[in-house]
Structures are given as C-alpha cells and as structure tokens.
C-alpha cells in the first residue's frame, strides 16, 4: 500500500461533493465531512475518508436513509432520547450532543442517548464539541460485535469506544479509546503484512490466543466465532475482565438506556444496523471556579508530561497531544491517503458521476 | 499465612466495637463497619477488616479526624461539592452518595464530588447504594500514586478505581475495577510467595518491566520510582495508554472537579491524606420505562453468560456474579481471615482495651 498526501481543503471539498451527490443538503454534507476530515487530521486514518466506502455501501443498501431526520422521543431538562431514524450517524450525533450541551448550559448536566443510528465516526469528535464550549464532554457508541467476553469464544461486544474531553492549556485532555485491546483496523494491517499477532490481542474459534491476523479478519467479517480480546487481553491475568466490563458499561450507556439494539444484534452490513450512542455534557462550573478547575487540570497534565521518562524514552504524552500535533502536520503537509482508498473514492465518484480529478 | 473462617456477625460486632472505641458514634461505627464487612463478604479481602490497621494508623496520626463532619460547600439541584474535612472516608462517601441519590430522585441526575476525604473502602459499595434504590450508580476515587504513565518511570497516578452498578435480574451488573493492570495487594501476594511477576504488571526504577515483586512493593512504599502499570501494561502494544487515560479521567472526576489533591500529592501515611471521590446517580426512568430498561440489561447479561465458552472453560461471568456468590458463601460458611490480620486486630483491641476473645 502506498500513500500520497493531499491538501485537506481539496479532500474536504471532494467529500462534501460526494455527500451532496447522495442527496444530502449543503449543510448536512458539511457536517458529515467535518467529522470525517477531523479524523484524518487527527491522524486516525481508520475513521476518516477511508470510511467513505462504508457509508456508500450503507446508503446503497438502505441501512442509511439520506432523507430521514432524527427524532426526539423523550425529553427532560437534563436528558433527551433520540431515535436516529436510520439517518447518517454524524448528523444524528451532532444533533444529540448539541441537545446535551444546550441542557448542560442551563441545568449544568445534559445527557443524550440515541438508538437506531449509524456509524458515527470518531467518538472524540462529539466529546470535543462540548470541550470547545467550555464543558466536560463524554461520547460513547456501541458497534457491531467483534469482541469476545473473558473465557468466551463468541463475538458478543462491540469495540465500544469511550471518549472524554476536558478543556486544558496548552492542549485539552482528549481520551478516545476503544474498550478492546486493539481495533480491527490494526489487526487488518498485521494481516496485510503477514505479521503474527502478539499473544493477547485476539482468540480463534477455539477461544485461545490466535497469531494469524487473517484468520481473525475472516472470523470477524464472516462469523461470530473467536474475536478480538477486551482491553487487558486473554483471561484474567492482565485483567481482561476489566476491558470486558467497560465494554458492557458502554453497552449500558448506549443501547440499554436508549432502548436500542445491543452490539450482538448490530450489523455494519446489509440494511440492518441500529447503532446506539450515549453523550454527556457537564458544566464544571457546578463544582467551583471554572478557571481554577481548568488550571488544576492543566497543571496535572503538565506534571505528567514532565515526569521521569522510562529508559529509552524521551517523551510522555497526555491524551489529545498526538492528535493536536497530527492536526498541525496535516494542515501544513496534507493528509496521507493510501491508494486503495483513492481507488474506492474513484469508484464512488464514478457512480455519482463526479469528476474526481476536478478535486484532487 | 494461614486462614480461619469467622462468623460474619461476630466480625461485624467486633469491628463496630473497635470504631466505637476510637470515639465514633454507634451509628457511624455501624456505617464504617458495613462498608468493611461488605468487602469481606464480596470476597475482596484486601479492602475488608484487613484494612483496620490502616484506619488505626490514620486515626493515631491525625490523618483521620474522628470528630470531624463532612461539609457541603456548593450545591445545585443536580450537584453537590463536599469537603470531607478529614473525616472517615466511609462516612463522607455515604453522605455524598446519599445527596447524589436524593438529587437523582428529583431531577433525574445527581453528581457529588468530594475533596479532603480518606480511604473509602470498596468503590462498589457506593455505586450499589444507588443500584439498591433502582438507580444507575457510579463511584470513583483517587488514591496515593503508585501507577506509572505510559513511557514513564515515576509513580504519578493512583490505582483510581471506577465502579458502575445497574439493576438487573437475577444479578445486578456491578463493575468495580482499578484502572491499573493489578492492585498493589496482588503484587504483595506474589512477593510473599517469591513468585516472579508476569511481564506487563510493573516497572522498576528504570521504567522497564520488573519481575521482582518485593522490589515493586519496596518502591511503591518508599519512593515515587518505578510503579505498577496501567490497565493494558507496558508501552502501547497492549494499549497501556488506555488504562493510563482512564486513570487520568478518574483524577478529573475526583480531585480536579472537587478542587482536591491529585494522586501524586495524596499519601496513605502520615497526617496528609486528602483523598478525592466522585459519585453519580442516574434515574434511568429519564430514558424510558424502567422495567423495560432493566429487562434489556438482564437479557444482555444472560446472553453473555450463555455465550460459547473458550475451550477449557465452562463459565463466563458477568460483573457482580462472583461477588454475589462470595456473599452467599461467607454468610453460610464465614469470612476467611488470615492470621496476620487477626494479630493486627488483637494489637488494636489491646490499644483500645477491648477483649477480642469476647467477640471472636
């Protein structure tokens, strides 16, 4: 796989054009594109324009309904329940987090739970929406089940990411993590390079540690057997049961509270999807002087960065630092996109009768 | 170390008598004892009556003030900030979670953050307080720093546990986990048995994987060097940065929001302590029919328990199941207590002029 760098403004314009091609409004195309490009800019290639093909397939088979709008089904001064109505996950999620933010600004806390949505991109996009408004933001989603519970051999839990974002200087705290030990994307890369998987990443159909990446890719694409291990790995020696528990907790805050489908019933293929999300915004002014609280967060993060480095390492990162640095780099040097993604985008453009060369 | 089983009612009476001996009221002695015994009953020996010596030392050196009461310093319809005022952590925490529950019953959500408290026992006690009231409960605490950030060699983060509890049938979901790969207690057990530590549990003063358990026990007791690894282990290969991020997130919800001391400044020795906690109660009736939501949680947990077992395993646990089974066992067969704990309790009883033999 070879990479070429593209000016982010050009990729942005192309992505907007693609979504307009499906029939999305100018505004909606901008929102969806903003989430996708944010991922590429943060260096999270797996959730950027590489996913255009996933949305293309979703729209083609009716899993994503271009003309549907999310609907509020229940609302209180601190909470909202949204039925995504099979609309694009990014549009549903932006609307839900905006409601949570609106409520947090009035009552101090706003929670939104969402059912019947679609793949929403990076979890961190939505927690950062709150962070940019001077609030503490939380974002979670369930996904198609690819993770196996401790002592199991059946995929039953999504990679179920959690993101928590909090203002701090000079760099906000942005945790954005799947509750599995690795993502499927990483396993695919090992497969393409024929590298054996480290013990503790995944189990085969017998529920035992598997080294063959391509076997795991096959199993997660075509069956519910084996699967990726939860954060902490196999069994309980390295506390795999904790990652498993976090995955179930995400399920609780997304599908269970919203009345949506649990991960074992979610599919990123065909026309059944039904992803659930959970969002929260907290005005930490509830607890004290906001400037003081931000300062104490900034001081702690700075102390962590300055703490003693392990031999052979010269840097300790805080969460969000790598993303902010990637952002600066991409802005200046462009977004690296691999040729197979470009090939897929070309296919989409041909289908939509868009001249890709006009854009990139 | 040899163990003997003791009737839980007798241990309970002895513990109450000990706390009354320090000058706590009948009611306060009952509350503290209830938290301690709940831990032993749940099979979490490390946080049960084994900790009597920790509290004894804390009271003797003025880290814990027997006569102080926690004070509410800020309050809104959805939140409360509590200054623990160096009172016993269990008393402070029960009061704070009760406030969160009270608020959740009115507005739907209640958050409590606490500073200047002391060691509060098991996180799960407080999340279960909400669960028993038909609410979703969250409990977190920071602790003395013993965990090293990814690529570091300095203890800077507490084991910072998170507990999430949610009603379900036949067994509630009770996640109660430190955000480190293991607790210090587990490392001590390896030390006592001269067993080498698995690679990925702890690092020595050079920041590299350490196998010598006694070295880690020494470092965590006497220095800020080396330390226990975050959930996910060393470096980023098994996502140690995720456990590290979760530890920082707990710091945010405890010390940062409450204006308390961050883990690097907390000490479980001397008369400086200043532990911070965070609690939340959520009435999930905000999101739909409570019975339906509980049912969907119960169904998902049951499906997990029934999902295919890895070869060589015949059971998949959901979180809280082991604790509930331990509870039934302890109630019937007694609480196993090791002889060195009994020796310590004898020392405390002698100091307080209590005849231990009258009780056990």
Image (cartoon, coloured by chain):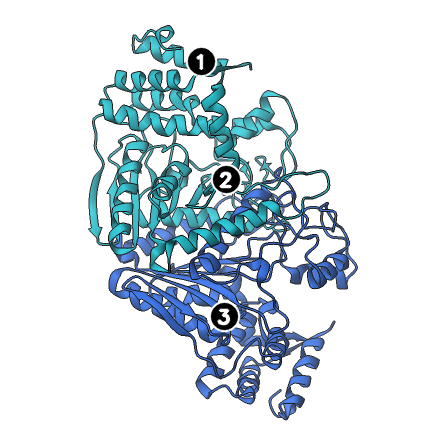
Chain colours: A cyan, B blue
User: Does any portion of residue A63 appear in the rendered image?
Assistant: no
**Mark 1: secondary structure:** helix
* Residue indicated by mark 1: A342
Marks 2/3: CA–CA distance: 38 Å
The percent coordinates of residue A88 (x first, y second) are: 29, 30
Marks 1/3: CA–CA distance: 56 Å
Residue under disc 2 on the same chain as residue under disc 3: no
Report the mark closest to the observer, 1 or 2: 1
* Residue closest to the eye, B15 or B297: B15
Q: Label 2: how many residues lie within 10 Å, few (<14), some (14-19) or many (20+)?
A: many
Residue under disc 1 on the same chain as residue under disc 3: no
* Residue closest to the eye, B323 or A164: A164
Q: Chain of mark 1?
A: A
User: Does any portion of residue B340 appear in the rendered image?
Assistant: yes
* Residue indicated by mark 3: B117
Residue A147 tag number: 2
Q: Residue at x 53, y 52 (%)?
A: A300
The percent coordinates of residue B137 (x first, y second) are: 39, 61
On screen, residue B147 above or below B326: above
Residue A94 tag number: none
């Amino acid at each position: 796989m070879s990479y070429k760098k593209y000016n982010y403004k050009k990729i942005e314009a192309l992505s907007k054009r693609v979504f307009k091609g499906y029939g999305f409004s100018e505004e909606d195309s901008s929102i969806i594109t903003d989430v996708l490009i944010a991922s590429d800019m943060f260096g999270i290639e797996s959730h950027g324009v590489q996913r255009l093909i996933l949305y293309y397939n979703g729209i083609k088979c009716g899993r994503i309904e271009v003309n549907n709008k999310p609907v509020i089904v229940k609302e209180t001064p601190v909470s909202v329940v949204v039925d995504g109505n099979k609309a694009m996950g990014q549009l549903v999620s932006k609307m839900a987090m905006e409601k949570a933010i609106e409520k947090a600004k009035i009552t101090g806390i706003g929670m939104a739970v969402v059912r019947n949505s679609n793949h929403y991109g990076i979890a961190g996009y939505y927690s950062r929406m709150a962070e940019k408004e001077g609030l503490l933001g939380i974002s979670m989603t369930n996904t198609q089940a690819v993770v196996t519970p401790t002592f199991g051999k059946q995929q039953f839990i999504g990679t179920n990411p959690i993101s928590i974002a909090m203002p701090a200087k000079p760099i906000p705290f942005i945790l954005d993590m799947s509750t599995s030990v690795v993502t499927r994307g990483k396993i695919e890369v090992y497969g393409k390079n024929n590298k054996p998987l480290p013990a503790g990443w995944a189990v085969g159909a017998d529920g035992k540690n598997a080294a063959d990446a391509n076997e795991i890719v096959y199993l997660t694409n075509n069956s519910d057997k084996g699967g990726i291990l939860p954060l902490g790995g196999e069994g309980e020696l390295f506390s795999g049961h904790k990652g498993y528990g976090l995955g179930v907790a995400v399920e609780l805050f997304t599908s269970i509270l919203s009345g949506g489908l649990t991960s074992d019933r979610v599919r990123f293929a065909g026309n059944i999807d039904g992803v659930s999300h959970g969002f929260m915004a907290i005005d930490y002014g509830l607890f004290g002087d906001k400037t003081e609280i931000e300062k104490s967060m900034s001081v702690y993060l700075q102390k962590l960065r300055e703490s003693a480095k392990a031999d052979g390492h010269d840097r300790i990162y805080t969460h969000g630092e790598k993303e902010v640095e990637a952002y600066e780099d991409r802005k200046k040097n462009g977004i690296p996109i691999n040729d197979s993604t470009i090939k897929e985008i070309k296919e989409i453009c041909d289908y939509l009768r868009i001249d890709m060369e006009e854009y990139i």
